Image (cartoon, rainbow, N blue to C red):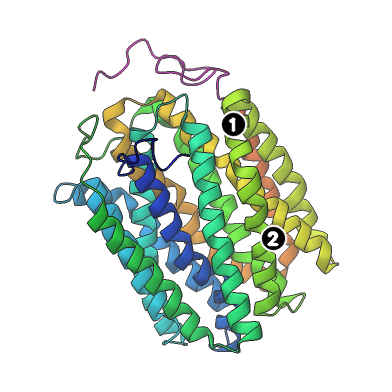
Amino acid sequence: MKLRSPTGRDWRRPEVLLVLISVAMPISFSTWMVLINNFAVERAQFTGVEIGILQSVREIPGFLAFAVVFVLLMLREQALALLSLCLLGIGVALTGFFPSLVGLILTTVVMSTGFHYFETVRQSLALQWLPKEQAPAVLGRLIAVGSFASLVAFALIYLGIDLGGLDMKWVYLIGGAITVAITFAAWLLFPRFPAKVEQHKRLILRRRYGLYYALTFMSGARRQIFVVFAGFLMVEKFGFDVASITLMFLANHALSMVLAPKIGKLIGRWGERRALTVEYLGLVCIFTAYAFVDTAWIAVGLYIVDHVFFAMAIAIKTYFQKIAAPADIASTSGVGFTINHIAAVVIPAAFGLLWIVSPAAVFLAGTGMAVCSLVLARLVPRHPAHDNVTVFFRPTAVPAE
């Protein structure tokens, strides 16, 4: 994505702002993610129960993402995106100073509120600002940009902790502070871009978006298995330290940086139905393998491939973009994030208890979720559009707004 025209005068464009905030977010969020399992186990003496509780609490702001539509009564989407990004950075910066269950819950709520509201608004802005024919490729490039930022963050974490002996507390502080600094730069350097279509400022639930809601729900459910328990498996079962986890994350994001733009283009060429089918077939195999893996390097390989499949989730966003009325995007993005997090609020804590009994059962449940998602993916039409929503439902009237 070009950041500057030949004249050098048009760099303050919406696409460039998307790139900048896509860099700022993963610097702090990746810092939180790569350290949290080791920090929780080593400093706060967490078991699977406490880590499950913490991750469930982390998802509560995502569950409340529908409220973004009410915040938009007071703030424009661009301003809310930057405010949320700043809140994310502050929450991460404070994390290392409170190594207890209560302390981590409080800082996690601050961090997570910023993260989920930012992601909700960023998705809405991207779908509004990007042309439909370019959206898959550009969203893929934005994932690559975020992966590059994560890659830099992980490299610095590895150098700081493993080679420099830096305490995790200061790593959290630095990561959060960088995000806050970039946010202020974005606020000062970019103009306030007008909305192409005035967005609804009320909650919207439409029958025609039912398949999108279902795909989003299942995506949130299966993602929790990966985010919460796949990483915890590495620490608890295979004894990975911070340096090992960081190197694994480095490999993840290096591969995503290369493959995400290609996956975005592939979705544009294949279509959403085929892309989602490939993703969920792959996840059935991956989760089943997680349940029985006893070799560390195989588990790492599964983790990396699992992470790459996340880029395929672009297809859910572009499917929605193609079937949605333009004025519905902001409201439905918030509703979609809430639906995505219904299972996310319950699964970490509930499956944390299941983990104590049988870690394999947790991943086999993920296999079941992937099978359900595969069935839903086959309901996506080959060519989604306003008048072609699913293979069974083609509305005769499309909302005018």
The kind of residue tagged 1 is Lys
The kind of residue tagged 2 is Ala
Give whichever of 33, 360 is nearer the camera: 33
**Position above or below: 162 against 378:** below
Residue at horizontal 65 percent and vertical 27 percent from the top? 274
- Quadrant assignment for the C terminus: top left
- Residue 293 in view of the camera: no
State the image quarter where residue 186 is shown: bottom left
Task: Give yes or no for contact between labels 1 and 2 (Cβ–Cβ under 8 Å).
Answer: no
Q: Please, what secondary structure does the residue beneath circle 2 have?
A: helix
Separation of marks 1 and 2 at Cα, in angstroms: 22 Å
**Position above or below: 320 against 28:** above
**Does the magenta portion include 46?**
no
Query: Which residue carries the number 1 mark?
Result: 265
Query: Which residue carries the number 2 mark?
Result: 251
Would you call the spot at circle 2 few (<14 residues within 10 Å), some (14-19), or many (20 or more)? some
Predominant SS along the magenta part: loop
Residue at horizontal 39 percent and vertical 77 percent from the top? 93
Residue at horizontal 55 percent and vertical 20 percent from the top? 381
**Precedes in sequence: disc 1 or disc 2:** 2
Q: Position of residue 91 (x, y in %)?
A: 37, 73
Q: Please, what secondary structure does the residue beneath circle 1 have?
A: helix
Q: Position of residue 77 (x, y in %)?
A: 25, 46
Would you call the spot at circle 1 few (<14 residues within 10 Å), some (14-19), or many (20 or more)? many
- Residue 166 in view of the camera: yes
Relative horizontal placement of residue 15, taking residue 295 as reference (left or right): left
Give whichever of 242, 316 is nearer the camera: 242
Give the farthest residue toward the top. 396
Q: From which residue to which does the magenta span run? A: 378-401
